Image (cartoon, rainbow, N blue to C red):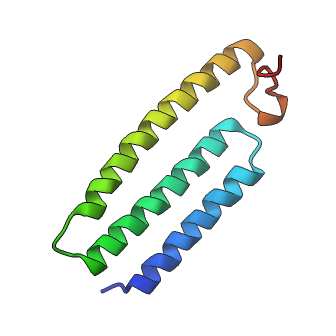
């Protein structure tokens, strides 16, 4: 059986990779994928704490379903905006997207 310490080390690793990806990526799709990795690490921590501390209740799993639905909506909106920006500029790099300026 995997201990809670090992799972939380994995969660911290996923979260660190996600933060690194958000801060260093120039491609918008890469940034969206890193944000999804952040959401997934939070989901894994909720399920872990729910399983180890309150195994009879499903509050962590229910909260994870809520996070997954919000993350899916966030991704849909982000990809729709990205598609509109690509159609206008023919580029998806964050450094070159300055169309929000007046």
Image coordinates for residue 78, horizontal then vertical, percent: 57, 31
Query: Between 42 and 92, which is closer to the camera in this rendering?
Result: 42
Name the residue: 52% across, 49% down.
36
Query: Between 100 and 96, which is closer to the camera in this rendering?
Result: 100
Residue 1 lies in quadrant: bottom left
Instruction: From the viewer's perspective, tell me whether residue 32 is left or right of residue 63.
Output: right
How many numbered circles does the render carry? 0
In the picture as drawn, the residue positioned furthest to the top comes out as 88
Query: Between 78 and 53, which is closer to the camera in this rendering?
Result: 53
Quick one: quadrant of the C terminus? top right
Image coordinates for residue 4, horizontal then vertical, percent: 39, 83
In the picture as drawn, the residue positioned furthest to the left comes out as 56
Residue 92 lies in quadrant: top right
Image coordinates for residue 80, horizontal then vertical, percent: 55, 23
Name the residue: 68% across, 51% down.
22
Image coordinates for residue 2, horizontal then vertical, percent: 35, 84
Instruction: From the viewer's perspective, tell me whether residue 100 is left or right of residue 69.
Output: right
Instruction: From the viewer's perspective, tell me whether residue 96 is left or right of residue 30.
Output: right
Name the residue: 65% across, 44% down.
30
């Amino acid at each position: 059986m995997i201990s809670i310490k090992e799972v939380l080390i994995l969660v911290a690793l996923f979260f660190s990779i996600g933060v690194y990806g958000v801060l260093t990526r120039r491609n918008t799709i890469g940034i969206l994928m890193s944000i999804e990795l952040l959401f997934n690490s939070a989901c894994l921590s909720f399920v872990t704490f729910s399983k180890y501390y309150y195994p009879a209740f499903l509050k962590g799993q229910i909260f994870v379903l809520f996070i997954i639905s919000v993350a899916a909506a966030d991704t849909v909106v982000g990809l729709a905006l990205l598609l509109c920006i690509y159609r206008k500029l023919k580029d998806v790099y964050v450094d070159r997207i300055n169309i929000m300026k007046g």
